[in-house]
Image (cartoon, rainbow, N blue to C red):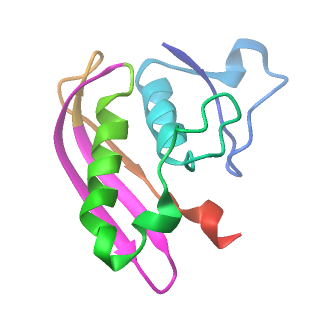
Amino acid sequence: MKFRGLDADGDWMLGQGLGSYAREEDALALSIATRLRSVYGNCFFDTEFGINYQLRMDPNHEDDLYQDIQAMVQQTDGVVLIRSISKSLNRQTRALGVSMRLQTIYDNDFQTTISNLAGALNA
């Protein structure tokens, strides 16, 4: 698996040839992060893709939010099994983060943490 690398600001890395790409586990982590940061309705060729963070950040929809996150991770190419997911949500700052342990095509115990999932709503 190969995935275009992202810099610290979340922008695509360019100009470094093959060095601009992440591979295997790093690529999988970027793929998961990119999918989870996709906001529902923002993908021009698939307006049904992404998580509806505006709706799901409502306290009455917290279970739905976590189910959406789990479904998005499970449907990511390279993910075999979700071993555990822990979520952190600060309603005042709207900060949402996810830590997970996964079985992947590369590793039986792959761990990654993704923060600022709902950051697009704060802009």
The image position of residue 19, as x and y in percent, is 69, 19
Q: Which residues are magenta?
A: 78-101
10 vs 104, left or right, is right
Screen quadrant of the C terminus: bottom right
Q: Quadrant of residue 79?
A: top left
21, above or below 55, in the image: above
Where residue 47 sits: x, y (%)?
A: 61, 38
Instruction: Tell me, yes or no, whether the highlighted magenta stretch contains residue 116.
Output: no
Against 123, residue 23 (above or below) is above
Residue situated in front as seen by the camera: 22 or 63: 63
From the viewer's perspective, is residue 92 above or below residue 39? Answer: below
The residue sitting at 28% across, 44% down in the picture is: 70
The image shows residue 45 at horizontal and vertical percentages of 67, 28
Q: Main secondary structure of the magenta part?
A: strand
Taking the magenta stretch, the answer to whether it contains residue 99 is yes
Q: Find the residue positioned furthest to the front.
A: 48
Please give left or right for residue 18 compared with residue 53 in the image.
right
